[in-house]
Every structure is written in C-alpha cells, then in structure tokens.
Image (tube, grey):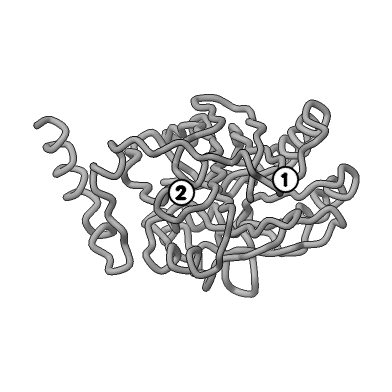
Amino acid sequence: MFLIMCFILLFSVSSCEILDDDYIFSPFSQHLNSPKEYDDSGATRILNVASVSLILDPVPDVNRNKIIAFIEKIVSEQPAVRLILFGETSLGYYYRPSNPSEYQNSIAETIPGITTGLISQKAIEHQVYISFGMVERSGDNIYNSQILINPDGEIESVYRKQYLNREDKESGFSTGNSISIDIVDNIKVATIICYDSASKRVNGQIQASGAELVLFPAAVNTGIPAFFYPLRPRHIKTWLLLANRAGNEDGIEYTGSIYLSTPTGINRVEMTGREGYIFAQVRCR
C-alpha cells in the first residue's frame, strides 16, 4: 500500500510530463519480473567498452581535464578497450536551478571546437572510440548533445537529445530530430540521451534501426525512481551501456550508477554511488 501511495504522489507531481502523448509509462510488473539469462556463448563479434561516472565541476576546464585523465587511466588499466562512454553534458552541471539558461549558454561550445579537438587527439593516440556529452552551440541555438569520435580523430556522429524534460527546457535546449547510428567494430550502435528512453518515438527509432548496442549517457539523480526509466534491453532487445554522473550539483545529488546490461536486461557489470568506471564486453552473434 505504501508503494502504491508513493506512486500516486509521484505521478501527480510529474503528470505534466508523464501525460505527454509520446511518453511510455512502464508498469511495476515490468521491473519486478526477473529477466532470463542471456546466452552469448556463440558470440562472433566482441566490443570491449568502458563507462564512466564523473563528479563534475561547474567550470568546463576542470571537467575537460578530468575526462582526459580518465581516458589515460582506462587505456592504461584496460589496454583492450575500444569504446569509452562519458555521461550527459559532461563539461558542466546538468542543471543549475538558479540560472539554468544563462549557465548552459555560458558553457556551450561549437562542434568542432576546443573540446572535440582535445578528445580527438586522445582518440588517435590510443586508437579508441570516445563518446561524451556537452552543450553544443549552433547558431542561436544550444543543444544537449553527445559526440562520438573515432580512432582517426574524426567526429563520427553528433546526437542531439530529442525528448526534453522540464530541466532541459528551462536550460534553453533546442530539440534534436533522430537517433545516431554508427558502426563500431562491426557492431551497430545507437546513441540516445537520458529522458529519450521514455519516448515512444525514440524507442521506435531504435527498433527500426536494428541497433545491437545503445549508448545511454544520462544525468540520473537520487530523486528519480528506477521505474521512470522504462528503456531496458528486454524491451528493445539490445545491449545497453549507461554512463551517469555522481556527486552533488547545486543541491541535486546524482546516483553515480553505471552498467552494461544484456539484451535480456541482466546487468553484466555495474557500479553505483561514486566516481569511477566499469570495463565490460559487448558480445554479439
């Protein structure tokens, strides 16, 4: 009964977004049922991946240096890594309640720009794919974007978040159009960002694309219950790599949860509550 009452309260508080026609509401039963183990013993394609949880600073220079330090740490400790994923808007705070739009405009960068140039150098040096989030400036607009850079140092794709929540809108972000699909070591990879997971349209794009792995950068805070993130591999039949943030940003506490889960929804590797990274294998037949 207590759980039901909590749900009713959460639903009423968040109803302005949950009642959107594009929103997928995920019943409790989908999260309480235990998914089956995933058999990847016959895998012929393997992608070694890392996902990072960062404690972020409001100043982009600090975060840029931290991203580079983590790239160096990961390739040193896991030399077989081929793809490193950093979370949503990793160059600054995701949301500043006091001045959200002014702040995000102050840290926005063009693509290509300072950060993409530095990350490109690291991608070439270590022969890895690197995906990271930032506030992108394009003309008069800013976007919540995720950039994938390939081992040649080229910008493979730029994905702009499509399904914006209240914080995104208050921050002044414009809306993107479609998911990004890239081929990484012969595996089809889709990129979405956080609240996109609750969009019927975005889930449909993933299914239609034939993606085998979804990169899922996010900014999940401790006030968001798990059932409000309905995209799970057992619904879309893909591997799912989550990168999140940790720590406190202007009074908002982030979970630090990161994981790689199988197409049946089992977390193969996971970590929560702190800054750090996980290393794991995506195994496709």
Q: Where in the figure is residue 156, as x and y percent of width and height?
A: 74, 63
Residue reaching furthest front? 42
Label 2 crowding class (10 Å Cα cut-off): few <14, some 14-19, many 20+?
Answer: many
Q: Which residue is mark 2?
A: 233
Identify the residue shown where x is 51% and y is 31%.
256
Viewer-closest of 225 and 34:
34
Left or right: residue 112 versus residue 98 is right
Q: Which residue is mark 1?
A: 83
Which secondary structure lies at badge 2? helix
Identify the residue shown where x is 31% and y is 59%.
24
Viewer-closest of 183 and 177:
183
Identify the residue shown where x is 39% and y is 57%.
165
- Three-letter amino acid code at disc 1? Leu
Query: Residues under labels 1 and 2: Cα distance?
Result: 19 Å
Left or right: residue 164 versus residue 135 is left
Identify the residue shown where x is 44% and y is 56%.
236
Label 1 crowding class (10 Å Cα cut-off): few <14, some 14-19, many 20+?
Answer: many
